[in-house]
Image (cartoon, helix red, strand yellow):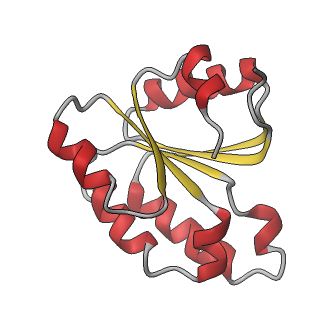
Amino acid sequence: MAAKKYRTVMLIDDNEIDNLINQKMIEAAAIAENIYTHTGAKSAIEFLRNMEKLEVASEVLPDVIFLDIDMPLMDGFQFLDEFEKLSNTTKKSCKIVMLTSSINPQDFDRSKKYTNVKLYLNKPLSQDSIQKINV
């Protein structure tokens, strides 16, 4: 089964090497025209808030956000709490995939409480896991 194609995806991970690896995997799978990367959840949420103000928001908002959980300053769950405050347009546009090295079952259970979290994957992103993304 071919992976779904997206206009734009966003990677949010404080580990630049993970971002680079995941970016290369997404490029190799050719599932996205554009890839935004953020090394912090705070900058990513600010980016989304700024995108909402544009008339072309629907064209520039990411279709899929790959979100790490364990990050300094603002973790993945704090990002999700802030994401919930964004406009309905943004929330409908952006589907979230938790991409984490956490093996804590509580993180998995907690992620289910957020309606925008469509999938929970363990790092690293692989061609196999990319094929399963259909959000």
Specify the farthest residue to the front: 1
In the image, taking residue 123 as reference, residue 125 lies left or right, namely: right
| Residue 55 shows up from this direction | yes
Placement of 8 over or under 73, stated as above or below: above
Residue that appears at 69% across and 54% down = 63
Between residues 52 and 104, which one lies in front from this camera angle?
Answer: 104
Q: Position of residue 13 (x, y in %)?
A: 42, 41
Residue that appears at 54% across and 17% down = 126
Placement of 38 over or under 89, stated as above or below: above
In the image, taking residue 10 as reference, residue 57 lies left or right, namely: right
Q: Position of residue 76 (x, y in %)?
A: 33, 53
Q: How many marks?
A: 0
Residue 47, located in which quarter of the rendered image?
bottom right
* Quarter that holds the N terminus: top right
| Residue 70 shows up from this direction | no
Placement of 7 over or under 131, stated as above or below: below
Between residues 90 and 113, which one lies in front from this camera angle?
Answer: 113
Residue that appears at 82% across and 82% down = 55
Q: Where is residue 104 in the image (x, y as percent from the top left)?
A: 16, 35
In the image, taking residue 131 as reference, residue 15 lies left or right, namely: left
Placement of 100 over or under 123, stated as above or below: below
Between residues 4 and 61, which one lies in front from this camera angle?
Answer: 4
Residue that appears at 63% across and 69% down = 92
Q: Position of residue 3 (x, y in %)?
A: 74, 28
Residue 37, located in which quarter of the rendered image?
top right
Residue 124, located in which quarter of the rendered image?
top left
